[in-house]
Image (tube, rainbow, N blue to C red):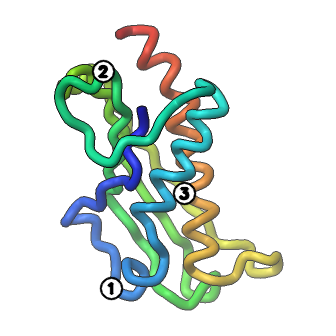
């Protein structure tokens, strides 16, 4: 199971406009779920990770760096902590971080579009880590 939406840590440092406009929690959870479901067909979404649910992948967005203004306002960076929970207890964890300038000369110019691309890649990174986490547990 994958927790969707992800949790936005209170100290993540995300600006109000990005928080309001970019749906970070929902998209981070959804992109990760899609990547996990490709590796583990039949995976399911769960709203909250708790005890007694078996294995649950919990996602927490720990850092968001980037101003509005798209590619013209500098790179966008996000860090996410992925925790594999077994019956509510953390049995494996990893931290993944990605950045993007957005490709000012390509089609990705809006801030939310750039963060969406970053979250898609982070979701793939977490899904790539998951088999090794499951192997040890």
Q: Residue under circle 1?
A: 16
* Real-space Cα separation, disc 3 to disc 2, in angstroms: 26 Å
Pair 3/2: label in front: 2
In the rendered picture of this protein, how many numbered marks are placed on residues? 3
Residue 22 shown left or right of residue 108 in the figure: left
In which quarter of the view is residue 135 placed? Answer: top left
* Residue 119: assigned label: 3
Residue at 81% x, 80% y is 105
Which structural element holds mark 3? helix
* Residue 29: assigned label: none
Q: Residue under circle 2?
A: 54
Relative to 109, is 124 above or below?
A: above
Q: Quadrant of the C terminus?
A: top left
- Of callouts 3 and 1, the N-terminal one: 1
Residue 105 shown left or right of residue 81 in the figure: right
* Real-space Cα separation, disc 3 to disc 1, in angstroms: 18 Å
């Amino acid at each position: 199971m994958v927790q969707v939406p992800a949790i936005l840590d209170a100290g993540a440092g995300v600006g109000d406009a990005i928080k309001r406009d970019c749906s970070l929690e929902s998209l981070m959870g959804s992109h990760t779920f899609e990547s996990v479901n490709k590796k583990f067909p039949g995976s399911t979404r769960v709203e909250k990770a708790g005890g007694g649910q078996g294995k649950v992948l919990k996602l927490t967005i720990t850092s968001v760096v980037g101003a509005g203004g798209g590619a013209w306002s500098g790179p966008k960076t996000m860090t996410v902590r992925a925790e594999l929970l077994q019956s509510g207890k953390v049995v494996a964890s990893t931290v993944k971080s990605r950045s993007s300038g957005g490709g000012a000369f390509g089609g990705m110019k809006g801030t939310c579009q750039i963060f969406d691309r970053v979250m898609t890649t982070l979701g793939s990174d977490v899904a790539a880590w998951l088999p090794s986490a499951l192997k040890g547990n």
